[in-house]
Image (cartoon, rainbow, N blue to C red):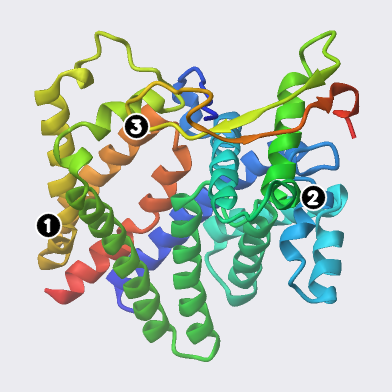
Amino acid sequence: MPAFLDLAARCVEVLCGSSLIIQTVEFLRLREPLSPRGVWTYAVGRGDLAHASRATQRLFEVISRDKVWLAHLLFRLFASMALVIYGASLPLIAFLFVGSVVILIRWRGAFNGGSDFMTMVVLTGLLIATTFSWFGDQEFGWRAGLIYIAIHSASSYFISGGVKLLNNDWRSGRALPLFLDGAVYGPLAATSIYWRKPVAIVCSWSFILWECLAPIIFLDVTIALFYCAVAAIFHVLVFWHFGLNRFVFAWLSTFPALIYVADQLN
Amino acid sequence: MFMPRATRKLAHLLHNPQVNLALTEQTLVELLANDLASCEDDAAALRLVSYQMVDRLVRLKVGAVSGLTAYQFRICLERPGAHIDPEADMILLSPALPATEWER
């Protein structure tokens, strides 16, 4: 494979694997809510699978047992470490992909919203890459996988910005302090600068314009690097104010794909 | 409205299970509010998976209150920027439930 493609692929593997390690260690700490004593016990959650086949219901009944769940998470942890150390292979990525789907179903569709979605996007990209590699076309597979990840990552920013742009509360700066006030690290202090309308408007429009400008990533690799640097700061700020730590690493693992595609287009 | 609060720590960047769980609990309550919008009657609401899970969530939360014999909860929809009116904003009032059964 060309050196730059190889570098981008390796960076995605390392960042995605690291993101999965962080998520899996958290899931290992969160087994109680899925246990028979927890809120998400399978005894109640199986109602969501009422439409599924008996085989699927039986499968989830077995997977949901505490010891089986623990074993799955431990295998997932080792698989994520293997992704970081040795790189992607079809069996490894297939296991991580299917495991992620199972985890999402147990948490009723999503555990952590957008970060779950972006993790699935990166795993899908890796699945595309390793499937083609399995059949001998490694270079095409990785190109296709990285393009898939880049399109989803850039469009996630663009759509997020577009939604804010169409929302009057965001345009007027009203939404930002309300979100921060209701956030997990809230409420906002009465003296917070975010309550000041000019500050809220400037911050809101900065987010809106920056997100809506996501397609410019593909104009030039330098722009892509700059956009990704700003995006990293943006995600750390989102973590700082909203506690969304998984978002940082889920999106970070898409940046090599964005930079690679920007380079290839120019 | 279920609004979890936590103390911010830099270490949470790498390991933040309790805050992520609290956010998922909040999402669960919001899912129940959405499910209730398409529910035909109260009996159907009580059969919802989201209702049963929120019931268990409430039981866990009130389980720490000593001497409690029964509990009841309500789901209110909060309008952005407005104070909650427990009566006007209520979309569900659960039956009175015995607290002794909370640990299954």
Which residue has dot 2 on it? A44
Q: Residue at x 80, y 63 (%)?
A: A60
Chain that bears disc 1: A
Mark 3 or 1: the one toward you: 3
Label 3 neighbour load within 10 Å: few <14, some 14-19, many 20+: few
Q: Are marks 3 and 2 on the same chain?
A: no
Which quarter of the image is occupied by the N terminus of chain A?
bottom left
Q: At numbered mark 1, what does the secondary structure look like: helix, strand or loop?
A: helix
C-alpha span from label 3 to label 2: 32 Å
For disc 1, the neighbor class at 10 Å (few under 14, some 14 to 19, many from 20) is some
Q: Position of residue A81 (x, y in %)?
A: 60, 53
Output the chain of dot 2. A
Left or right of A57, for residue A230: left
Disc 1 marks a residue whose amino acid type is Thr
The amino acid at mark 3 is: Pro
Chain holding disc 3: B
| Image position, residue A130 (x, y; %) | 51, 78
Q: Quadrant of the C terminus of chain A?
A: bottom left
**At which x and y percent is residue B32?**
60, 45
Q: What residue would you read off at disc 1?
A: A222
Determine whether, in the image, residue A42 is placed left or right of residue A186: right
For badge 2, the amino acid type reads: Val
Q: CA distance from mark 1 to mark 2?
A: 51 Å
Q: Is residue A22 visible?
A: no
Q: How many other residues sit within 10 Å of disc 2, few (<14), some (14-19) or many (≥20)?
A: some
Residue B80 is marked as 3
Secondary element at image label 3: loop
Question: Which one is nearer the viewer's eye here, B88 or B104?
Answer: B88
Q: Which mark is residue A182?
A: none
Badge 1 or badge 2: first in the primary sequence? 2
